[in-house]
Image (cartoon, rainbow, N blue to C red):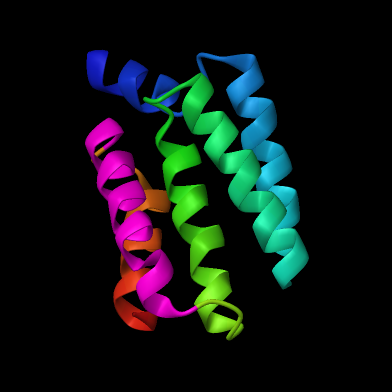
Amino acid sequence: MAEEKRQLTRNVPRNPEAHDQYLRGRYHYARFNLFDAQKAVAYFQKARERDPSFALAHSGLADALMVLPISGDVATNEVFATTKAAIAQALQADPDSAEAHTSDAATKFWF
């Protein structure tokens, strides 16, 4: 029963403001262009500031940062360290996070 409860509550945001910033970041990330990727990065950073244990915000930041070198707008070495740190923070906050593992795999593929 304890494991079932943990699975049901692990992605429940504890901070509504962080969750709102995260959702705004995901909206802009999904548009997949330079302008919106930059906005997504800012929203994910705000979500992380409001709730440093919010794993989805960390993996969202990593995802948004990956858009920048893929689009050719930023050099890989400018965002690689920040991307890897965000993934590490996501995995530390929630080692079972599918989103964090997906971000990690995408980083390994693209970088």
Q: Would you say 3 lies left or right of 59 here?
A: left
Q: Find residue 111 and report its horizontal and vertical position in percent.
A: 34, 80
- The N terminus, quarter of image: top left
User: Would residue 86 be counted in the magenta stretch?
Assistant: yes
Q: Which of 101/15 is in front? A: 15
Q: Is residue 38 above or below residue 71?
A: above
Residue 95 seen by the camera: yes
Residue 61 placement, left or right of 78? right
Compared across the picture, whether 76 is left or right of 44 comes to left
Identify the residue shown where x is 51% and y is 49%.
60
- Kindly report the secondary structure that dominates the magenta region of the rendered protein: helix
Q: Is residue 76 magenta?
A: yes
Q: Quadrant of residue 107?
A: bottom left
Image quadrant assignment for residue 4: top left
Q: Is residue 83 left or right of residue 84?
A: right
Q: Please tell me which residue is depicted at 29% across the width and 75% down the height of the picture.
A: 108
Can I make out residue 32 in this image?
Answer: no
Question: What residue is drawn where x is 29% and y is 58%?
Answer: 84
Which residue ends up furthest to the bottom in the rendered image? 72
Q: Position of residue 99 (x, y in %)?
A: 43, 51
Residue at the (58%, 86%) spot, across then down = 72
Q: Is residue 91 above or below residue 101?
A: above
Q: What segment carries the magenta color? A: 75-94
